Image (cartoon, rainbow, N blue to C red):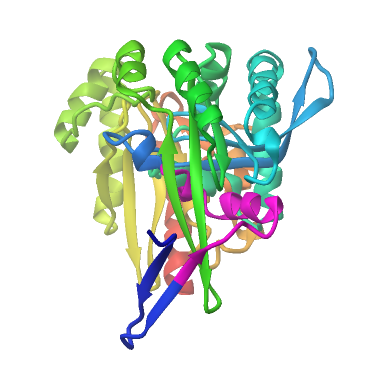
Amino acid sequence: MTDGVFIVRNDNALVEMRSSPFESEDLLQQLLATHPSLIAGDAVDPTNPRRWLLIAREQAVPGEEGGAGRWSLDHLFVDQDGVPTLVEVKRASDTRGRREVVAQMLDYAANGVVYWPVEVIRQQFERTCVASERDADEALREHLGRIDADLDEFWRKVDVNLRAGRIRMVFVADVIYPELKRIVEFLNAQMSPAEVIALEIKHYTGQGLRTLVPRLIGRTAEAERRKGVSGSSTANSRPQLTEEEWFSWFAEQRGPVEAAIAREIRDWWVARGGRYEVTSAQKPSMIVKFVHGGGHCWPSIMRTNGRVTTALCYIRKSPPFDDVEARRDVLRSIEQAFGQRYGERAVDGEPYVPLSLLQEPTAREQLFAIWQSMIDLIRAGA
């Protein structure tokens, strides 16, 4: 039986790819960092495929409260439910891939769940984004697949999962030896809520091409039975609401006065061409989509906590608000009009005004004037 794969190109030429070791362990690590989907999220959870967000390569793991990094984990990811996923990589040529790496991983996990402050993890993610010239909030919203995602709530989930030991340990190698396979299957069957798996990534090369074939190891029927079906934590979503259902629900939560203000805000945007959509989150929001000559943006969101935001983070691609100074002008206008004080990060965030401050018609007119100015500038810049 040949140890290779064959690729048929568009010109009908056959390319033979032969199995070969990775040139270096660093190459395999870099491939995982650049292409997290190699960690076979659909095999990890077939009913709700996992998506991976890289926190960092060479993530420091402290060995005491407030301590510096005593160890260095190859990769730290989180999935869309905030489950920390620890990844350790070894090539087949490294004999530690069979046993020592298991003890190493357990050290990382045992200390990480106790001594990793979630604030440090969040800061490390932001540094990773800066290094790759990405905006951290935008990258996280893209990972979550929700433009209205509550980012602080997500990081709280990460913290809760860590403290509960709800983590995932992944051993990655180009060959998973039988000894490691048996250890992984045993640990995965015994440990709960933690999950332990191995990922074998076969490497094929030929004619300047590289092919990677991941295969998940360690998830057995017995392990799934003991863990209660799936090892992942899926978020419960509220059924999609219509606008009128949302307003009825909002009135129950916040009262008729704030519901009436929310309706007036909705009507104001609709009169100017905006279209509202209700999100499907557990606490759904109303988000306005504004179409203009250069595309569209999402300039405002009404939250279930009684706040209306000016979503500076979602107008950054619409000139002139691709310039940070233009967004700062909007932020200053909101601060001056409503006596609010926002941090520097609000220029790329969602500065809000409580609906309780908008009970007077003059206050609402001030906010509408700020938004009208935004709309005029966006249309002029399109």
Identity of the residue drawn at 34% across and 26% down:
234
Identity of the residue drawn at 44% across and 48% down:
214
Q: Could you tell me how many numbered marks the image carries?
A: 0
Q: Position of residue 70 (x, y in %)?
A: 82, 24
Q: Position of residue 309 (x, y in %)?
A: 45, 39
Q: Is residue 256 visible?
A: yes
| Front-lying residue, 128 or 360 | 128
Image-quadrant location for residue 306? top left
Image-quadrant location for residue 304? top left
Q: Position of residue 40 (x, y in %)?
A: 42, 44
| Front-lying residue, 1 or 217 | 1
Q: Is residue 33 magenta?
A: yes
Question: Left or right: 318 with respect to 297?
Answer: right
Identity of the residue drawn at 69% across and 37% down:
95
Q: Is residue 165 above or below residue 201?
A: above
Which residue ends up furthest to the bottom in the rendered image? 11
Q: Is residue 331 visible?
A: no
Q: Is residue 96 magenta?
A: no
| Front-lying residue, 168 or 276 | 168
Image-quadrant location for residue 367? top left
Quadrant for the N terminus in the image: bottom left
| Front-lying residue, 141 or 63 | 63
Q: Position of residue 280 (x, y in %)?
A: 27, 35
Question: Left or right: 2 with respect to 326?
Answer: left
Quadrant for the C terminus in the image: bottom left
Which residue ends up furthest to the front in the rendered image? 1
Q: Is residue 88 above or below residue 168?
A: below
Question: Left or right: 136 with respect to 70?
Answer: left
Which residues are drawn in magenta?
17-40
